[in-house]
Amino acid sequence: MSSDSTPSTPPLDPSRLWQIHGAYYDLEPFLTEHPGGRRFLEQVRGTDCTAVFESTHLHDRMPRAMLKRFYVADNPAYVPEYSWKPDGFYATLKRRVQDHFVQEAAALGLPKGDHRFAHHGTPAFIGRLFGFWAVWLALTIGAIGGGWWWCALPWGMFAFALGGYGHEAMHAGVFKSALANRVLALITLDLQGLSSFVFTAMHVPLHHVHTNVSKLDPDIEVHFPLVRERPEQPLYWFHRAQPIYAWILYFITLPVLWVNDIVTVVIGVWFGPYGKLRRPYWQEAAVFALFKVLSFSIFYALPFVLHPWPQALLIVVLMLGGGGFAVQATFALSHQNSLAMNLDGRTSTQAGDWGALQCETTADFQHGHWLPTTFFGGLGYQLEHHLFPTLSYSRLQGIVPIVRATCAEFGVPYFYYPTAWHAIRAHMAFLVRMSRPDPVAVAAVLPGPGAG
């Protein structure tokens, strides 16, 4: 056969493939089989998704074996963004946490091979979900239907607690079923006006991979220029007052995100250039539109239909303002403080290790009893959540000693504030430092033990 008749190999198109540890894989045939749902895979198509693969698959023997079926080619020009050395910090920690849950599965009496399910929500955790949802529903009916301000006032706390369940469902951490997790996200986040479709696409492959990294983590870029959170960001005259007005801005978080979700879906980017969104399928678009209409009708329009506008305005402000404040303020406690932002110029002992980056840019607060943990949406265990995002936060207290010990062994910081109040004060001190010309040179008053 002449060379002219030999079929030519189609050129490699990296934008259609998934890159993991410098190898290309074609996961198109696996999209509908993926246990976490196809959206996770589609959002990271065409990127180096090594960090997403490593962190979302705690028990990774089966996923690694599966990848071989979809191997396409190596990338000869591959330069790893992070280090994944087998004897490094994160690999060592991951093995120890794997062993912990294998033993946990045995203690729970799970069949052999089901150890990968031992880290989903505990029965008590799932039971509390129904209790919190029932209270939230009663408060919603009392506030909107009855016009009672005393129902609107605590609504935000319960809304954020449910949002914590929804946030975890997006990470596939509550139920074994991807469908069950998807439904939970819809009736917690989307029903309150926050699109889990948009949040999943931006939150997992961007914030979780590049935590507090300038120009890569959208969670710290989107507040600028109103709030300055990085030393390299320009300092404007109005930033002098940001320790005061930042807290006021937190109250408008929910309506801002309600609008921005729509803008993101229409134009395909989230808050400017920080994250590109793949276009939704018609089913996703229909669900998105349905819940946007529902949330607007219930929380923005219905109070003004049922009550005089001053009373309706008070109800809306108390509900949505309180909920937005809980969302923004609590997320800020974990990443927006002088320790997590490294304003004092620490030198990393494990430079390049992805797990060490998560520890260096995240702080925990107020471990312990399930009640405050639930009201804070599980974010008191944010450091462990960033290291292993698919673990239910009802299981994270069990791995805290493992993480602390491994951090101590490798010289990696473990930032922890003993109470939420300590974390709030640290965030306030951070806002003050960032309102000054040289935040690195300003002495910080940071309560709590810091690195431990």
Image: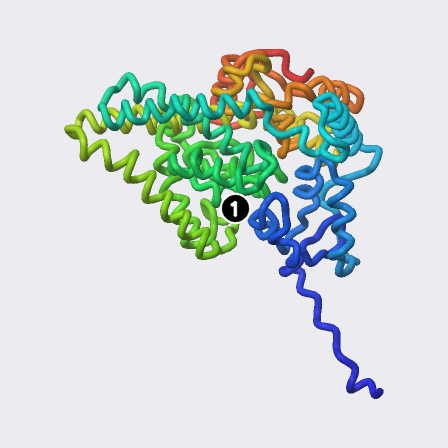
Residue 71 seen from this side: yes
Which quarter shows the C terminus?
top right
Q: Residue furthest left?
A: 308
Q: Where is 135 relative to 17, above or below?
A: above
Judged left or right of residue 359, residue 294 is left
- Using the image as rendered, state which of residue 169 and residue 386 is in the foreground: 169
- Using the image as rendered, state which of residue 163 and residue 175 is in the foreground: 175
**Mark 1 secondary-structure assignment:** loop
Q: Quadrant of residue 257?
A: top left
Which quarter shows the N terminus?
bottom right
Judged left or right of residue 163, residue 289 is left
Give x and y (percent) for residue 443.
57, 17
- Using the image as rendered, state which of residue 34 and residue 413 is in the foreground: 34
- Using the image as rendered, state which of residue 38 and residue 53 is in the foreground: 38
Label 1 crowd bin: few (<14), some (14–19), many (20+), radius 10 Å: some
Residue type at mark 1 is Tyr
Judged left or right of residue 70, residue 297 is left
Judged left or right of residue 412, residue 320 is left
Q: Residue at x 71, y 28 (%)?
A: 110
Q: Quadrant of residue 238?
A: top left
Q: Residue at x 44, y 35 (%)?
A: 189
Residue with the mark numbered 1: 274
Residue 79 seen from this side: no
